[in-house]
Structure formats: structure tokens, C-alpha cells
Image (tube, grey):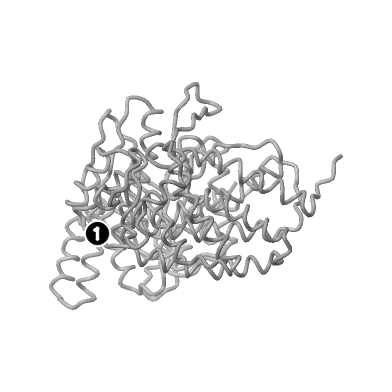
Amino acid sequence: MKDNLFTGEEARIRLVAGVNKVAQAVAQTMGTAGRNSLIKEIEDPFYFPTNDGWKIANSIKLADPIEEMGRCILLESINRANRESGDGSSTTCILTAKLLEEGIELEKAGKFPAMEIKRRMDAFIPVVVDKIKKQSKKITVSEVKTVAATSAEDEEIGALIQEIYEKIGPTGVIHWEAGKTPKDAYEIRTGIKIEQSGYASRYMCDLDEHGDLSSTVKMENPSILLYRGRITSPDAFDKIMQEIYEKNIENIVVFCDDIEAAAINSFVTAKLIQAKAGRKFSLVAIKVPIIFGDEWWEDLRIATGGDIMGNHMTALSSLEKATLANLGTIRNLIATKDDVYLDGVANVAAFDAHVNSLREKGDDESLQRAERLNTMAARYFVGGYSPNAIAYRRMKVEDAINSASCALTEGIVAGGGVAMFHAAKEILDEQDEISKVIAGALFRPFLQIMENGGFEADKKITHLDLKNPAIGINSKTGKAVDMFEAGIVDATAVLINAVKNAIGVTSTILTIGNVITFPDREVAYPQASIFGQ
């Protein structure tokens, strides 16, 4: 039996090697002249090309267990950036690899211990964020096409997303799903958006077409259980869950004030047990923040047609007495970690009357409630001639939708690595070793994009206008252009999240002194009390 403990320089070198292998694969895809990676899924006879950094990083598996741990640490950063802004995976990879390279050299030279490097790097996060935000400009719905098309590298997708936003407005919501025709299409709906609310655990999310956990929950015609209170144990749900199981209800949503970890684990385990048994079953718990008060619960009750259960004074009865008749329903529910969207109310007449009564009250709070209950939303149907074609295009559409949403909220900056280049120039202090490390990493995306375009990056730097952060290089032509006028832009939030997550990963690896590995074990599915099994 081999030792499972790896210490000191050996452990860190192999961790960094894992990060670098992923970064090198992703780096080749950056910019309009970037190349694709060809991916072959295990159970899929077809190959498909992609330049989506998130997909590439998730598809790589490294034979060396320590290198694989490095990849997984980087992957967590990429996934976090993807969840926060839906894009920026490639930038996060490039920044992380360069920060590690420079940070390790700094420590080897004996200039700073690892913990001091971490502390100083962390201190630069708000500084870099401020420099990027100063370059940001707000956009309107009429400018969304530029952002979406750049993110997707597809003018058609960009145009369609702008067309949608022109109908639903800047506060509207767009959700994607696989279409049934070769062409992309969409439909507009009106529904309810609950912000600052989301699923209790990512393990309640759907699996994507490759069997990996996604970052969303999508349900059609789910049963809704409204519970006012904190869920501390799943035992109280045994009776109602048994009825749900016996009636073969496939989708159940539990709205609650809060839920403890033990109850979350039991809910997730119940879902896994049913999946292992070959039964289609989804269960998600959604926390409604207490600050929303009784109003949101009343809105949910009217929208879903369900009764409020629990010990709260607004509840109809306790959970132990609940039956299927007390459950509500909704046509569609989409939940992320940050918000929930519902459409297709159970009783349209009652719901419309409720919204109209809020509008008639006329006070600010009532009008805001009415607006939340009438969120315009679109379902974007991703087209294609085959499942593989749809899967490839879906990644483009998802990135474009998320980038457009972020841009409408927080604005845009010059793309092509230019915004980070200017941020680097502003923070660079030749007397401060840490600023040189951070600046070196921020320069890297621009240099990589130029290299992918076949240009000598050092020569192209001379064409930049250091006093005008809008001037950059078009990587297709190699000419200096106004990046905003040329439509080469990035959502501000995407770059900010990339910086935060890259520094976070770098700090983690720099401070690691040893690595302990364990052999893979088969996942066990313990028996759960709910469903009576």
C-alpha cells in the first residue's frame, strides 16, 4: 500500500501542474481567434467541439491524483464564477495559473511567507474591483445585442436576446431550454420572481445531459407545500411525503422560512434513493427570507392555490395534519441559489384580482408587490439538428443570457482583455512585489488573446491608448479600435467575479503544506425516514 500523504514542495508542484494543464487547454479558446477543444463523452458515440471554458475544465480528468485535486480546486473557482455571473470561466483559469506561477516564485525567492502573500493578494481584490468599475458604462436594452453576441460569438443569438429584452424589459427574466426545431425560438410569459431566495442545497439541482449537477432546478407542474417555520427534522413530513410517494407525484417543492442541515441531507438522500430505484423524482426546498414577511406568503398562497402549513399564526393547520388537498401547484418553476421564478398560476381569476387590488392601494409597497407578481419572462428554446448540436449551442446561449443580464445590472467594459490591462497599469507599483504579481496576471488575458490571434503581443501593446480605456485591439484584424463601437465588450460583473475567484484559488494553493488522498468509494445511499422506506 502506498502512502497517501504528500508534503511540502512535491504536493504543491503537483497541485499547480493540475491547474496549469487545465489553464493551457482553456487558454487556446480565448478571443475571437481562439480554437475549440474536441470533447468525447464516455457514453456518447459523437464528438463535439466547444470553446466554453467551463465545459472544458469539467470534462478534463487527470490521472495523477494530486494534479486532479489541483484541477478540482480550480474547478470550484470556475463553477463559482459561473454561478455568480454565468461566464468568465476562461478568464478565471488564465488569471489563476499566472497568479500561482508568480506567487510561488515570490515565495521561493524568500521575499514573503505564503500566508503573507495570501493576505496581501486578498487586500488587492477591492482595489482591482474599483479600477474595473471605473471603466464601466451603463447600457440600455437597445445595446444588449453587443454583449450577448460577444459572449456567444454569434450575432444571431445576440440579436434574438436583444429582441426578447425589448419585449420583457431590463428587469425581465430569460430561461433557456432545449427546443424541438432546428431554429432558435422563444415565448413570453408573465410570472413571479422571488429575489434573495433560492434552493437550500445544490444537490437538489437537476442533472444536465451529461449526468453532471447543473446550477438550476427546473420543474413542470410541481406540487407546492407552503410551510411557515424552520424545518429542523424531516420526521414531520413523513405523512404527507408518504401520500406523495403513493400517488407517484414526481416533483415536489417545499417553501419554508429556513431549513437545517440535517433536514437538507434527508431530503437529498430521499431523492437519491428514488433515483437509484429508477424512479423519476425531484424534491427541492426553497428558503423564503424572513424579511419578506407575511405578504410574500400570501402572494404564494394565492398564486399556487396551496394552504399555508405550520405553527405560524397565518397557517391553516399543522404539517402533521396536511393532506394532498392542502398542496398547491404551478405550471413552471425555475430556481437558482439566488432567486426563484414561477409562472402558470393555479387560479388566474383570483390571482389577477389580487394583483389589481394591490395596484388600487397605490402605496409604494403595494405597487412593488404588484410589479414582482408580474415579472415578464421569456423561454428561449435552443434549436439544432441533433442533441449534440443543441448541447453545443446551449452553452453559447446560456453564457449570452447571463452576460446580458449582468451587463444590464452592472454595466460593461472594453473586452479582449483591455479592461484588465488598464486595471493592471493603474495598480502596478514597481516597488511593491505583490502589485507586480497581480498586475502580471491581469495583463495575461490580453496577451493570450493576441497570441491566439497570431500577433506579437508586445508589439500590439504599443497600439493601446493608456489614457483611453476604450481603445483596444481587434484580435481578428490586429487593428486598434474603440472596443465599445466595435462591439467587443465584457459584462463588468463577469470580470470582477473572475478576479475574486482567481485570487481565492491562488491563496488556497499557496498556503497548502500537505495533501492527503483517499481511494474512491462507492457512494452509499442510507435509508431515509421519509417515504417510509
Q: Residue at x 32, y 25 (%)?
A: 385
Q: Image check: 264 left or right of 161? A: right
Q: Nearer the viewer, residue 508 or 116?
A: 116
Instruction: Residue type at mark 1: give it.
Output: Ile
Give the image location of residue 503, x and y in percent.
Answer: 56, 60
Observer able to see residue 410: no
Q: Tell me which corner region of the image, top left, top right, bottom left or bottom right, holds residue 309.
A: bottom left
Q: Image check: 300 left or right of 523? A: left
Image vertical order of residue 375 relative to residue 398, above or below? below
Provide the secondary structure element on which disc 1 rests. loop
- Residue at the limit of the structure toward the bottom, as seen here: 363
Q: Residue at x 26, y 43 (%)?
A: 158
Q: Nearer the viewer, residue 283 or 455?
A: 455
Give the image location of residue 116, x and y in percent.
Answer: 67, 69
Q: Image check: 92 left or right of 5? A: left
Q: Tell me which corner region of the image, top left, top right, bottom left or bottom right, holds residue 196.
A: bottom left
Q: Residue at x 65, y 37 (%)?
A: 62
Task: Name the residue tied to disc 1.
Answer: 139
Q: Residues within 10 Å of mark 1 (few under 14, many from 20)?
A: some
Q: Nearer the viewer, residue 260 or 323?
A: 260
- Residue at the limit of the structure toward the top, as seen here: 45
Give the image location of residue 110, x and y in percent.
Answer: 74, 63
